[in-house]
Image (cartoon, rainbow, N blue to C red):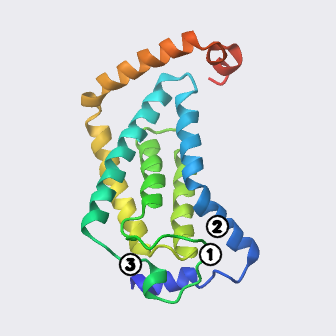
Amino acid sequence: MNYSLFKLINGFAGKSEVLDQAMIILSKSAIIIAIGLVMYLWFLNKNERKYTAFYIGLTLILALGSNYIIHAFYYHPRPFISHHVVKLISHSSDSSFVSDHGTLVFSIAFILLMRKDRLAKFTLLWAILVGLSRIYVGVHYPLDIIGAIILSGITSLVVIKTASLTNPIMKILMKLNEFIVRKVPFLNNKELKSLD
């Protein structure tokens, strides 16, 4: 079933230059977009958004840390190791389960959903497309992405449910942020505040 679904999705690769390039861009740009999104949330001068960025950071530490442990104890070969696939990007032959990219994007999407942020629906759509792109370009199986969704969902829920324990850390970060903003002139200008 896992390989059959992989073949179905990866089977579209190599047939349309436009679709191939779109999937390559989605797959390769996920980390850059994720960093940009978290920075956008943090620098918006809205405390609610800063807390969201903080929870995303905690979720990523917990989820990607869990992923690292899974990879250390369980090796699952990537599709291009075990099968003939249409591989559109270069990739190392490390373990495919659970997908790091999938964990990254779904962790962000789930925190935004749980925080009822207006970007949540768009981010969830982006996460789904990134997940599909990783299968399309030939580096992940569907179960790698499903595993990432489950892991991200659990860790996001843990972070939100234990927020009262981590909020003191956030308060320290907020004070540090205020100090830096006061000391760095271009971070304290009216144009930045108008983004609120």
What label sits on residue 98 in the rendered view? none
Looking at the image, do the residues carrying marks 1 and 2 touch, with CB atoms under 8 Å apart?
A: yes
Q: In this view, does 138 lie to the left or right of 59?
A: right
Disc on the earlier residue, 3 or 1 = 3
Identified by mark 2, the residue type is Ile
Q: Distance between the residues labelled 3 and 1?
A: 17 Å
User: What residue sits 67% from the left and 14% below the top?
Assistant: 189
- The location of residue 33, given as percent across then percent down, is 59, 48
Disc on the earlier residue, 2 or 3 = 2
User: What residue sits 52% from the left and 57% below the top?
Assistant: 127
Q: Name the residue under label 1.
A: 88
Q: Distance between the residues labelled 2 and 3?
A: 21 Å
Q: In this view, does 100 lie to the left or right of 160?
A: right
Crowding at label 3, few (<14), some or many (≥20) Cα neighbours within 10 Å?
some
Quarter of the picture containing the N terminus is: bottom left
Looking at the rendered image, the disc whose residue lies closer to the viewer, 2 or 3, is 3
